[in-house]
Amino acid sequence: MEILAFPYAYGSKNIYYELKNELGSRFGLHPFDYPAHGTRLDEKALRSISAIVDDAYEQIKEFISVPYCLLGYSMGGIVTFELYQKLMRENQPLPEHIFILASKELNWKYENYEYENFGLEEIKKVLREKNGTSEEILAENELIELISPAVKADSIALRDYSCDADKTIPVKCKITIIRGSKEINIEHCKESWERYLKRECEYIIVNGDHFFLFNEGKDMTKKIANIISDKLSAIRR
């Protein structure tokens, strides 16, 4: 079974390298880059979740004729949810399972900054506040300039995103949501997500901050891989 995976804001598909290796031959993890990210750096950045989802829909078409599942990390979780909604509207084959990692609730209000006008130092500040970029990388001005369009676009997409729970299509497959114990304001995460999913979900708390999959070492990667494998193995039975 293919696991079609989408990264967090500002990230590329390479974030899933260790998880892909840990899953090994059990399940094939196929991650995607958004435009202006990673292998698609020369493409125009997309400034709305809906545009990102439309692009993701085109990217996965060749993979959904066989059993598959969706996985998203942080912003990738939002993309995954909205992609499922689009697949339903377009009467396309649906995933067997959805995994949403480190994703805030769909009604979360992001910072209302004018990212369109941000300069290099303000971009660095955004990356530093997200705590996912090392100081060594932040010191590389040419690199930060290179990724600035993606940082701005993703920030704008999250800032402007909204979702009406009254209009969402109920999710038919099982959902596993995983959050880090040190993430902020996760007390009502499960119930909030379920309002939009319109079904119960499995909610797992693991040790770590927002980047638990990447900051907690190989044991965490193995733990997440095992969770995924257990859920998908149950489908195969």
Image (cartoon, rainbow, N blue to C red):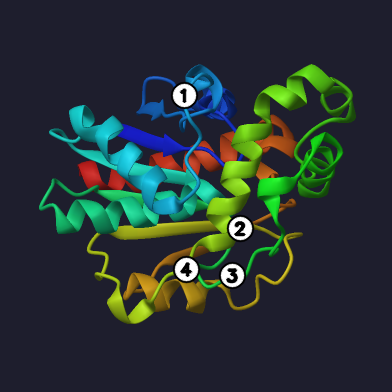
Image position of 148 (left or right of 162): right
Q: Horizontal and vertical percent for residue 137? A: 82, 24
Residue beneath the point at 19% across and 49% down: 94
Q: Amino acid at mark 3?
A: Trp
Q: Nearer the viewer, residue 69 or 162?
A: 162
Q: Nearer the viewer, mark 1 or mark 4?
A: 1
| Disc 2 + disc 3, Cβ < 8 Å | no
Q: Position of residue 161 (x, y in %)?
A: 50, 62
Find disc 1 in the rendering and name its residue.
43
- Picture quarter with the N terminus: top left
Q: Which mark is residue 179?
A: 2
What residue is drawn where x is 61% and y is 58%?
179
Label 4 sits on a secondary structure element that is loop
Element carrying mark 1: loop
Disc 4 from disc 2: Cα separation: 21 Å
* Percent of width and height locating residue 171: 27, 65
Quarter of the rendering occupied by the C terminus: top left
Q: Is residue 104 above or below residue 199?
A: above
User: In the rendered image, which quarter is residue 222 located in?
Assistant: top right
How far is disc 2 from disc 3 in space, using C-alphas?
Answer: 15 Å
User: Which is more N-terminal, label 3 or label 4?
Assistant: 3
* Residue that lies at the very extreme toward the bottom in this rendered image: 166
Q: Which residue is mark 4?
A: 162
As displayed, is residue 24 above or below residue 32? Answer: above
Which mark identifies residue 108? 3
First of labels 1, 3 by sequence position: 1
